[in-house]
Structures are given as structure tokens and as C-alpha cells.
Image: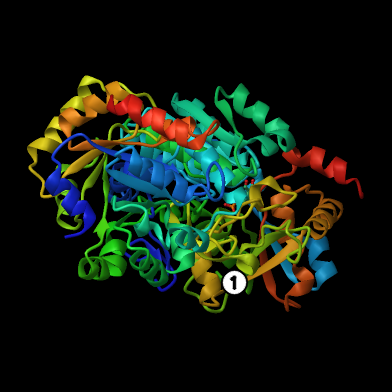
Amino acid sequence: MKYNVNSNGFYGDFGGAYIPEMLFSNIDELKKNYLRIVEKDSFTREFNFYLKKYVGRPTPLYYAKRLSEKYGSKIYLKREDLCHTGAHKINNTIGQILLARELKKTKIIAETGAGQHGVATATVCALMGMECVIYMGEVDIERQRPNVERMRILGAEVRPATSGSRTLKDATNEAMRHWINNPDDTHYIIGSVVGPHPYPDMVARFQSVISEELLGQLKKVEGRDYPDFVIACVGGGSNAAGIFYHYLDNPKVNLVGVEAAGLGVSTDKSAATTKLGKKGVLHGSKTLLMQDENGQVTEPYSISAGLDYPGIGPLHAHLFDSNRGEYISVDDDEAMNAGIELSRLEGIIPAIETAHAFSVFDKLDMKGKVVIVNLSGRGDKDLETYIKWGKY
Amino acid sequence: MNRINKLFKDKKDKILSIYFTAGYPNLNDTTEIIKTLDECGVDLIEIGMPFSDPIADGPVIQDSSNVAIDNGMNLNLLFKQLEEIRNITDIPIVLMGYVNPVYQFGYEKFIKNILECDLDGLILPDLPLDDYINEFKPIFDKENLSFIPLITPNTSKERIRQIDDNSNGFIYMVSSSSITGKKSSFDDKQIQYFKDVKGLSLKNPTIIGFGISDKESFKQACKYSHGAIIGTKFIKEISNGNLRESIKDFIASIRS
Ligand SMILES: Cc1ncc(COP(=O)(O)O)c(C=O)c1O
């Protein structure tokens, strides 16, 4: 497993656990127990039960005929948008809440950007009867209203993060501070493949159900279990990690991550981490990070709240650094246009995060190839942003 | 023997350490603050290197960091301000902050600057022990610099021993499971933790920090350790009014 995590929690030069001592015992508890727990038969059985009966897995692999015709390729969509709550995020929250229960934790906290992870967390907390506090940047609370109300209906408390850029990064800071203040009874469900080891590996494992299903589904329709291209949007990188997972060590598969360029990589309003980032340490891991020359983290921007983050998970930093993955950045307009195109050609309005993944077909040499796009979420939560953008 | 070791050799209790954020309230207050603290008889000074995302800090230190960064504080400038500091004071000075700004500055260059300014130690709470041992310890040992680790009520005894073995100077005993700037009276559980740590007979002395804000909590902390660190309350005190007066009044109120 050349591209996966090593026993020290590193992916190449990236990863590790850069945390203050106040979090050490919690992270150490996770590190010492997560593999033992997630590899237990009883855990797997319960995890699979909820994924099947509650989330609605396996999600379909859908051949996108009109999109394929337009781009002269065989484009399949992995329909994570059809998961309960509307995005891939719930694969991870089901896994983590079962883990939290094993660790005898009674309270859950989480950060959220687009609100999808917050909703997925609030959902599993309702399901398991656990107390739930979600931190969300003030800016995101404004642009993802419907999800805020969904969390509240589900019984979660949504606390605004009012510092910094008031987006995902700041919500993560607040969640970590909350955990420092409440280390004993609380589990922090991180929503992407970011944070200190073992989070990136743990979240990737829970999301790897996506590529695991894909192996069999693809074999049925294409006669082989791997595609030529796998494309996914990258905020922290959990949906991408989930759909790359079983193909990491298969060099025949081109792994393509799409990050948000915001208003463009040459402006100061962007979230294109692989283009603009340097090696650094944030939220517990060494990774690529957007920062100024003094090591202060810069405030990212993207029209999509879920990609509006100044770092990426250490797995992706490693895939990028070692050239195993190709990372492309697309701006707000390209993403919005792609969202409209998918709506018109396939009758699917994607989340704006997801729309980024649909705007790179012209940038790849994929004529005649088998291409999988991870349709990570649906666009219901983004109607207001679509309406404001208006060009449809 | 560096200044920190000497301090703890000469003085066994009631050591008062003050934390402030460099560049706050104004960009060029650093030397004035240090000079005044020296005049007030403070024993140890921790200079905070501001960071945009200080996850172990409460609102007061967060704000001071943001103001400092907006004022233009950075490590190049801080070391420039500290170039001549040994003409002003002989108090032990340690730098405290988060990994990323130091990492960007470059570990080697950072240590070189610490030596050039004749500072005494470093507190970098999010630096893993392994990284310290690999990247800092050889040169810290050679140059007799102190690396000051944190322990908390949740740090296991075995880990405290390991931390004690790998550091020299003093151990920063975080009073409770919390970020900076929280409540200031100690409950039974905390006092038991202080006693437990005392019972370990560590090779390094301990100083209690987090939640120390006044004469009473300082006195309490000193019962169970060699002294205490005040940060949040000090920053609040100097946030407005005359800098020298505020510092003098505050230190007097602790030491009276
Ligand atoms: C639908 C959808 N896709 C993608 C993301 C980005 O997260 P990640 O990169 O971890 O998949 C989000 C985050 O909120 C999301 O809601």
C-alpha cells in the first residue's frame, strides 16, 4: 500500500498528529483502538446494516448517456447524492458514531461547511440518541440556511463560529477548542480526511465503501473492475478518498481531484490548495496549506461552502506530491455552468461542491475512455446560490 | 546552566511567569513590556508568537493574536526587536506559539535566531514529541536551551515520565482540561492532579498555567508547584490605558 497511511500516521511527508497535549489522550485513545474496533465482525455487521437499511446503499452506478455523448466518453455517475441526507458524508458519520459508542462517549461535536456533514452528524445523533453540537461559520450559516434548519429539526445545536473568515476553517478551530474543554465524554466527528492521525485514515476507510461497491458494479457493466478515470471534487477530500481508495495502487486508473479556484488562482479569492498551498501544519496534520510567507493561514474563498477550506487531507497532499493524482482547479463560473449542464443533460441538480467535478471533462484526455464521476451530493441545499447566480 | 535552570536553582517557589502576545497591543511594545516586567520583578517571561489559528486559546489570546498579526508582527520582526534584549534584562525568556509559523520560518534559522538573541527556551504545544526529539533536541541539548512541554490532567503517568526525560527547564502543568482563559478556582479533582504530579518527583520543576488570574489563584497554584503563569488576564490588563502603569499595577496586585 504505497499511497496509504504508514504505521506512524504519515502519507509520505504528510499527516501525523500535530496536536497540543490537551488533545493527546483523546487522539491516542482513537489511535490505539480504531483498527481494533472497525475490524471487528460485529462492528462491520452493524456498519453495513445501517449503510444498507438506513442510508440506502449500495448507491447506483448510473450511465450518463447524454453527458457521455457530449464528451465522447463513457461517463458513469456514482450516485452518492442518493444517500440518505443527500451526500456521501453520512457514510463516515455512521461509522464514527458506532465507534464513539464503542468508546463509551455520550456527546458528539462536529464542524461543518456546507452543512452536509453537520446534517449527517445530527442525523446519526438522533438515530443513536446522542447529544449533538455543530460548529458552523457565520458566513456558511447564511449561505446554507436550509441545512442549518435541518440540523435544528434533528435536535442538534448549531453554534456559529465568528472568528477569522467565519467559514469551515474557523468552525473546525471552534470544534477543536470544544473538544479540548470536554475531553472525557465527547467524540469529535471530523467530516473529512483531515485532522490528526488517525482521522484521515479512519474517515477514508469509512468512505471506501464507495470504491468497494464500484469494483463490482463496474465489472458487471464494463467487464473490468477499474475505470480509466475517477473524478471527484476535493474540499478536505473525503468523497475523493472514498472513490479513489481501492484504486490507489492501480496505476491504470487516473485519479483526478477537482478543487475550487473561487474567482481564480491569480486572485486572492480562491481555495485551490495544490496550486496556492505550501507544506504546513493546520488542524493537527502536516499537509499542503494556503498561507502567507509568515505561516499565517490565508482565508480561502469558494462559492461552495464545502470546498472553502485552506488545506487538503494529507492523503491528497501525498497523491499530488508524488504525481499519483492529478489535481485541477476550476473557478466558480465553471462549476456553476457544469452544475447547470448536468441538470439539463441528466436531470440531476448537483451540490455546488460536486458541480466542480463535472467541469473538467474538457481538460482531460478522456475520449473513448471509461470515466467515473463521484456525484457526491445533491443540490437542494444550494438552490439559493443557484438562484443568486441566476445564469440559467 | 541556562537562565531557566539557574532560576529554579535559586528560587524554589512563588515563581511568577507572564505571557504576552508579541505585537500587542501595539507592534513595537515588545521591549517596553519586557523592560517593565523586569522592573516589577517578574521571574520569567513567555513571548507569544501570534498565529492565525490558535486552537488551544480562548477569545482573549485569539484576539490579541489577530491584532498582532494585523499590526504586522512576524518572526523576522520579533527577532529584530529582541536583538538587544539582553542589554535590558537578564530574566529568562522563552518563546511560545504554534508549529506552523516556526516551520515556515525554518527550524534551523529559528534556533539560530534564538541563540543570537540569547533567549532561553521554547514552548510549542502542537509539536509532537518525536519531531522535537528528531529536529530540535540535539541542538537544544548542545546549546543548553530549554524545551518546555505541557502536561494536562489527562496526561498519563507513563507519558509524564517520558516527557520529563526528554525535556529540561520546567514542565508547564496545564491546570485543567481547557483552552486558555477559563475559570480560575481549582476543584478537588484538579488539586488531586497537582498532588499526583508532585508525587512523581520529576527531575524538572513544574509551573501551573491556564486559569491563573489573580493573587488568590496564584497563591493556590504555588502551593502545588514552583510557580504559575499568567497570560489571558495580563493581556486583558494591558489592552488599554498606559502600558507601564497597567503592568506595574497588575504585577503589584499579584505580588502584594
Ligand atoms: C456534496 C459535497 N461534496 C463534497 C464536499 C467536500 O468534502 P470532501 O472533500 O471531504 O468530500 C462536501 C462538503 O461539505 C459536500 O457537501
Q: Position of residue A295 (x, y in %)?
A: 53, 60
Q: Position of residue B92 (x, y in %)?
A: 28, 52
Q: Is mark 1 within 8 Å of ligand 1?
A: no
Q: Is residue A200 visible?
A: yes
Q: Position of residue B48 (x, y in %)?
A: 43, 48
Using the image as rendered, state which of residue B213 and residue A81 is in the foreground.
B213
Three-letter code for the amino acid on which mark 1 is drawn: Gly
Q: Residue at x 87, y 46 (%)?
A: A389
Q: Residues within 10 Å of mark 1 (few under 14, many from 20)?
A: few
Q: Residue at x 61, y 35 (%)?
A: A162
Q: How is the image coloured?
A: rainbow
Q: Residue at x 64, y 40 (%)?
A: A166
Q: Quadrant of residue B103?
A: bottom left
Give the quadrant of the N terminus of chain A.
bottom left
Q: Quadrant of residue B153?
A: top left
Q: Is residue A183 left or right of residue A310?
A: left
Identify the element where label 1 is drawn.
Answer: loop
Check disc 1 and report the residue beneath it: A223
Q: Position of residue A385 (x, y in %)?
A: 80, 42
